[in-house]
């Protein structure tokens, strides 16, 4: 027993006590092989998973070092079974290697003949393999590179992909040194540079950075390092346009070199930004636009918000293993549990930084989260209590008694840009009328959306009411107050994204405030509790106040 | 009848020699033993001799078997006693001096069993028995060429000279003299072709003799001839050589310390679970698959881990079978209140002496079934000597070559050191080694300091060693905004109990984690806590201020608690009018005749109540669950005034004294009795350095091994 800051639990989680003098060193060492699960104020929870251990092996860490960290930093004895399991799991990485053979093309090699034999006899893997060259090498059909990696991961023998990448069509891209809009000099922040370097050294993989920490700039940095034609996949048209604007500001690329491939426009240029939606659009049972991924000689493919990557793109990505792939995300948590596919098809995690650490460095705005509880009057409670399950959420979440509370919150922040976010359109319309603010919904055209967002960014619109269309990838750096008046059935993802909208650093350094208005004693409060669990676990402690105490 | 020679031998021993004898053969000391004659009676009793034989090493047992079968060596006693193995056999009083010779104590040959060294009985004995059997069965046919039971019968000096076709048949009797043969009473045929009918050829020559109608036995003389006349000649005087693996001390102690911490935590978790939901037994005995699955899920254990845990709790008296309900409950003594090293010592002491082998659960039986968890099948009479043999062998290996020793190497040495236990060692040894690892006696296959202390009978020293692995309990928890409390270590039992009432346990490990929820706080409020009391407790036991969201949750829950209140009788629900109205309209209570005797009161007729386990729980609790579900659907957690009273927890200065540990079949005599006898026999001239725990310890091993 060392008296260290780590406590290794028998359920494979590791607790890190932050107040301990060795906490910083231990965190740095631990983060290399364990996934941060929760990061509240005193004790962070990490989890040791096979994916995390293989990520560590991919980054050059060996089992001996991992065991040494646990034994040296752990306050209490570490379950021996866990140590054995870590050693065994990590030893699996690298025993199978995908390589390029000058004669046979793509081959799978192993210095462990029984492993090769085991997988060669696997019912689903065997069809992907070609003839056996010798005891340690077997040919792999080039088109099966992605699928093979997926299956190998599923059977617990992840392959290290050293087969390299196609160069793609060269296209010069550099980062600018001055922001053309302001004339101010700029450069990648240290952690962004670190992320670019780690990614480039690893070949393909995922960079995990919190919302507001400048993932687009990491993308731009990687594009500059690659200097090839690039396909950027994003979640929406708006997001595509923001990527374009950012690339124009931060790189030497010009308008003509950047194309948009969305529902509205289909341009293919040296740098093409496409939406997941258009790629996965079906016509006659086919995905006609999915070909975009493979019809051009891209040297780099960037997947923005990789945790949202839809299944057809996964399938197509399996065919694109010869192209360098960069995944960007704020969280590797997928509500559908497909983290393994991100690992095998996009690549291992190449960089990860906890939100709080970047916030402490001053690169994202600190956030103040407040849950406001509204007491429903007796009549509403009777209606709620007597309603069927299907209607209860709607009744509680869209209670008219929330409107007044929202108005009071907005009044508390005069002169600050306020976003009001909700799920129910009637409620949003009422709020728009009450606050005299425009309402942006799914039915709002892209042109009007852009106009509204531009006005909001310019400070001409003090309040903007938005539906869930605003959840992803819309950069509203000046919003410093958000009021969430209703949300979906407790999606952790949604809450993180909404807060992310507010986390861009403010020019005047003021903090962001995130209000959630919930109806007390109803399912609305239950869902709210679930949604905020993600952020509470990220260290954003909520204050809970009664509406009357505002 | 005890021979005078043995009495004289005993009386001539020095006090130190007598002390060593009593220590090694403490089972010979019975209530009322007061003289050398009494002691000698105990020493030559069948059970006493058997236990002593069980403790002999291979060379020692070989010497005894050889003496029984071929007679004592024709060498003066003084020469024999000068070295192994006779010196130890004498110290254990298995042989005694008589005149100038050395003699086996009476009863020793019988205690060896019917087939010493796997040899059959003498031909004369078998032939006489065969004649009786055949007469009784009136077997017709020719008599054998060598008349059964004829005086002067001599086994063939050279079995190898017999026709080659009969040799494979004889080979089958090499290690055990009895075999199955249909129609075993037939006389065989002296003229049979040995190639076609080898068995008849052998039967006719008395080389196989019937012991009943279906079994034959190889006479001792033939067996000896088959094995070259001296089966012990090839016996190894040297123990198997160790093959240690390098195990750093840090890794060894880490593994063992983690195992001890985990074991005590799991025992506490198991008892807590059984306190809530006792373990029901099957009508046929044992525990059903469904119950075991439930426990495995609750405790997150593998099947074998759970079986071992239940067995350990049983042998330590930590769980008890209620004969009225046929349910296993935790023993009421507050075991968890004892300091953890004492908890460990209690379990260890019980394990060391018990007949129960927890890892026996799951072992296949001859009839195709397996030994059930918490059944008599886990009782193994020789469990204690097998444990001693394993730990002693580990200690011997560690003394010769420090490091990790694989189970097969430990078992190989144990078989050499305790050949009479070989079968039990093979059957139960691997499981017992796993149990030893769970108790922290082994770490990564290497003997730990507590393991060595236990092997040497120094249990209190072992507990002191273990105490260094189990730091003092913490009394403060880290409260966080995500509504969790994390104890940075083992939590003091009273704090843990209180926290367990306030919050739900999460995860498994040395740092207990709890999550506060509305439901957990309602549960605490039902149990008599108040919101203010909870906040005061949190302020006292939390490091730093209570996080605002947690304080709000407590206050909010307290504010809403009791707005609906359910009390026993028919269910009487009192509360605010709108909530009662909503409750009355709820679909869960549709069809039940509700009454509203006064504003703010709703009476729901209770359904039939009973303890019939085949009925769904909702029916067993008089429909309470349905009522609670209906109340929750209105958005309000009801307060229950209907819970059963908690059973009283007994109190004692040392909670371990309250535990009743099942007695082993062969309990060791109390150390005081042994001391008293020694004082009486030596006239108070007893040596001071008696071993503190009685046992059958060896002082030397052949080949330099020590125990």
Image (spheres, rainbow, N blue to C red):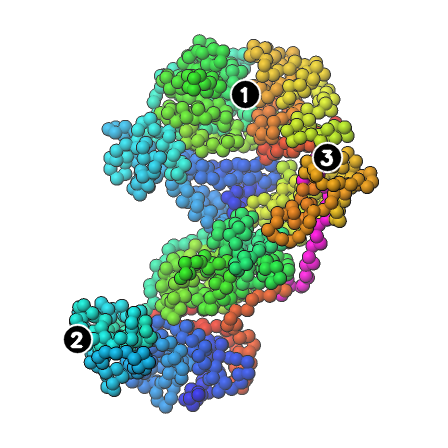
Q: What x and y, as percent, mark residue B451?
A: 47, 62
Location of the C terminus of chain A by quadrant is top right
- On whether disc 1 and disc 2 are found on a single subunit, the reply is no
| Residue at 53% in and 47% down | B297
- Seen in the picture, residue B82 relative to B618 is either above or below; the reply is below
Figure quadrant of residue B506? top right
Q: Label 1 vs label 2: CA separation? A: 102 Å
- The reply to whether callout 1 and callout 2 are in contact (CB within 8 Å) is no
Q: Pointer 3: residues within 10 angstroms few (<14), some, or many (20+)?
A: some
Asked if badges 2 and 3 are on one and the same chain, I answer yes
Nearer to us: label 1 or label 2: 2
Label disc, if present, on residue B191 of the rendered structure: 2
Q: Nearer the viewer, mark 3 or mark 1?
A: 3
Q: Label 3 belongs to which residue? A: B585
The residue at which mark 1 appears reads as A473
Query: Does residue B551 show up?
Result: no
Horizontal relation, residue A94 to residue A266: left or right: left
Query: Which portion, as a residue range, is magenta?
Result: B629-657
Whether tag 3 and tag 1 are in contact, CB under 8 A, the answer is no
Q: Chain of mark 2?
A: B
The answer to which of B459 and A144 lies nearer the viewer is: A144
Residue B524 percent coordinates (x, y): 70, 46
| A529 up-or-down from B61: above or below | above
């Amino acid at each position: 027993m060392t008296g260290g800051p780590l406590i290794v639990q028998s359920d494979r989680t590791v607790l890190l006590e932050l107040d301990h003098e060795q906490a910083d060193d231990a965190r740095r060492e631990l983060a290399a092989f364990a996934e941060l699960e929760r990061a509240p104020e005193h004790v962070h929870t990490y989890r040791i998973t096979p994916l995390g251990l293989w990520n560590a092996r991919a980054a050059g860490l060996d089992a001996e070092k991992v065991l040494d960290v646990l034994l040296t930093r752990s306050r209490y004895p570490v379950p021996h079974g866990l140590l054995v399991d870590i050693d065994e799991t990590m030893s699996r990485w690298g025993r199978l290697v995908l390589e390029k053979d000058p004669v046979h093309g793509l081959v799978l090699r192993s210095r462990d003949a029984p492993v090769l034999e085991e997988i060669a006899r696997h019912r689903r893997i065997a069809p992907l393999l070609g003839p056996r060259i010798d005891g340690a090498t077997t040919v792999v059909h080039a088109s099966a590179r992605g699928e093979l990696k997926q299956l190998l991961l599923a059977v617990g023998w992840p392959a290290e992909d050293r087969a390299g990448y196609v160069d793609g069509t060269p296209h010069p891209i550099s980062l600018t040194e001055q922001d053309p809009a302001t004339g101010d000099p700029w450069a990648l922040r240290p952690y962004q540079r670190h992320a670019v370097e780690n990614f480039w050294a690893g070949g393909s993989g995922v960079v995990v950075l919190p919302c507001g920490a400048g993932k687009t700039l990491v993308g731009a940095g990687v594009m500059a390092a690659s200097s090839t034609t690039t396909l950027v996949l994003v979640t929406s048209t708006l997001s595509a346009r923001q990527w374009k604007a950012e690339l124009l500001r931060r790189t030497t690329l010009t308008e003509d070199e950047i194309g948009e491939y969305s529902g509205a426009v289909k341009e293919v240029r040296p740098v093409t930004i496409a939406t997941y939606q258009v790629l996965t659009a079906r016509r006659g049972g086919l995905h006609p636009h999915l070909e975009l991924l493979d019809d051009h000689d891209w040297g780099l493919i960037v997947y923005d918000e990789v945790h949202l990557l839809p299944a057809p793109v996964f399938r197509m990505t399996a065919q694109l293993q010869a192209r360098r792939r960069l995944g960007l995300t704020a969280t590797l948590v997928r509500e559908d549990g497909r983290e393994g596919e991100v690992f095998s098809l996009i690549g291992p995690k190449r960089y990860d930084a906890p939100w709080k650490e970047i916030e402490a460095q001053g690169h994202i705005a600190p956030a103040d989260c407040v849950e406001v509880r509204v007491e429903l009057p007796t009549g509403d409670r009777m209606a709620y209590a007597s309603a069927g399950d299907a209607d209860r959420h709607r009744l509680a979440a869209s209670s008219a008694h929330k409107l007044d509370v929202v108005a009071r919150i907005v009044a508390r922040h005069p002169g600050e840009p306020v976003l009001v976010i909700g799920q129910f359109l009637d409620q949003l319309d009422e709020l728009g009328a009450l606050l005299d603010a425009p309402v942006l919904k799914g039915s709002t055209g892209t042109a009007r959306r852009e106009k509204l967002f531009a006005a909001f960014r310019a400070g001409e619109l003090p309040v903007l009411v938005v539906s869930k269309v605003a959840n992803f990838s819309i950069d509203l750096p000046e919003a410093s107050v958000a009021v969430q008046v209703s949300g979906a059935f407790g999606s952790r993802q949604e809450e993180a994204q909404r807060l992310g909208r507010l986390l861009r650093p403010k020019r005047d350094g003021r903090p962001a405030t995130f209000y959630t208005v919930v109806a007390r004693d109803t399912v609305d409060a239950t869902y709210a509790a679930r949604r905020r669990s993600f952020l509470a676990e990220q260290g954003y402690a909520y204050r809970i106040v009664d509406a009357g105490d505002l | 009848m005890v021979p005078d020679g043995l009495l004289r031998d005993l009386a001539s021993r020095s006090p130190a020699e007598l002390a060593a004898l009593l220590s090694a053969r403490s089972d010979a000391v019975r209530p009322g033993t007061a003289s050398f004659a009494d002691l000698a009676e105990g020493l030559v009793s069948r059970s006493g001799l058997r236990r002593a034989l069980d403790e002999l090493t291979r060379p020692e047992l070989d010497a005894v078997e050889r003496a029984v079968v071929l007679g004592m060596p024709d060498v003066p006693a003084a020469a024999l006693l000068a070295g192994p193995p006779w010196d130890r056999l004498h110290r254990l009083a298995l042989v005694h001096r008589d005149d100038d010779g050395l003699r086996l104590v009476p009863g020793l040959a019988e205690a060896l069993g019917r087939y010493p060294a796997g040899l059959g009985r003498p031909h004369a004995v078998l032939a006489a028995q065969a004649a009786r059997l055949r007469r009784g069965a009136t077997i017709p046919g020719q008599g054998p060429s060598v008349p059964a039971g004829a005086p002067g019968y001599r086994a063939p000096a050279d079995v190898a000279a017999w026709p080659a076709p009969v040799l494979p048949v004889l080979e089958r009797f090499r290690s055990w003299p009895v075999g199955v043969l249909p129609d075993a009473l037939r006389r065989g045929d002296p003229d049979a072709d040995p190639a076609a009918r080898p068995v008849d050829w052998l039967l006719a020559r008395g080389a196989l003799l019937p012991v009943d109608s279906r079994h034959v036995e190889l006479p001792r003389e033939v067996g000896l001839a088959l094995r070259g006349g001296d089966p012990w000649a090839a016996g190894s005087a040297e123990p198997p050589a160790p093959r240690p693996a390098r195990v750093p001390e840090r890794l060894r102690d880490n593994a063992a310390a983690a195992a001890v911490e985990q074991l005590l935590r799991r025992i506490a978790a198991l008892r807590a679970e059984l306190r809530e939901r006792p373990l029901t037994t099957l009508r046929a005995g044992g525990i059903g698959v469904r119950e075991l699955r439930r426990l495995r899920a609750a405790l997150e254990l593998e099947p074998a881990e759970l079986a071992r845990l239940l067995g350990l709790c049983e042998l330590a008296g930590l769980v008890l079978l209620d004969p009225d309900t046929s349910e296993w409950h935790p023993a009421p003594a507050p075991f968890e209140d004892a300091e953890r090293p004492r908890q460990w010592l209690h379990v260890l002491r019980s394990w060391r002496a018990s007949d129960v082998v927890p890892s026996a659960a799951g072992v296949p039986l001859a009839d195709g079934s397996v030994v059930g968890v918490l059944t008599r099948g886990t009782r193994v009479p020789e469990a204690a000597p097998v444990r001693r043999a394993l730990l002693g062998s580990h200690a011997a290996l560690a003394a010769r070559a420090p490091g990790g020793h694989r189970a097969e190497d430990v078992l190989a040495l144990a078989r050499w050191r305790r050949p009479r236990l070989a079968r039990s060692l093979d059957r139960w040894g691997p499981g017992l080694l796993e149990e030893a690892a769970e108790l922290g006696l082994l770490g990564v296959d290497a003997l730990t300091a507590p393991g060595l202390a236990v092997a040497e009978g120094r249990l209190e020293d072992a507990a002191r060693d273990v105490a260094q692995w189990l730091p003092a309990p913490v009394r403060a928890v880290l409260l966080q905004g995500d509504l969790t409390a994390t104890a940075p270590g083992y939590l003091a039992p009273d704090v843990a109990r209180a926290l367990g009432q306030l919050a739900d346990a999460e995860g498994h490990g040395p740092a207990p984690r709890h999550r506060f929820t509305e439901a957990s706080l309602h549960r605490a409020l039902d149990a008599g806590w108040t919101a203010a009391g909870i906040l005061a407790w949190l302020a006292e036991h939390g490091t730093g201020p209570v996080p605002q969201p947690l304080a709000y949750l407590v206050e909010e829950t307290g504010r809403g608690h009791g707005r609906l209140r359910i009390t026993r009788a028919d269910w009487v629900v009192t509360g605010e009018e709108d909530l009662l109205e909503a409750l009355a309209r709820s679909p869960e209570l549709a069809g039940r005749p509700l009454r509203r005797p006064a504003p703010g009161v709703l009476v729901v007729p209770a359904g039939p109540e009973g303890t019939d386990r085949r009925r769904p729980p909702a029916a067993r609790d008089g429909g309470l669950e349905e009522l609670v579900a209906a109340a929750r659907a209105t958005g309000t957690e009801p307060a229950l005034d209907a819970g059963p009273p908690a059973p009283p927890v007994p109190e004692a200065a040392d909670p371990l004294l309250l535990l009743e540990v099942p007695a082993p079949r062969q309990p060791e005599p109390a150390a005081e009795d042994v001391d008293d006898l020694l004082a009486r026999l030596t006239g108070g001239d007893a040596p001071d350095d008696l071993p503190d725990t009685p046992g059958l310890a060896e002082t030397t091993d052949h080949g330099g091994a020590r125990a």
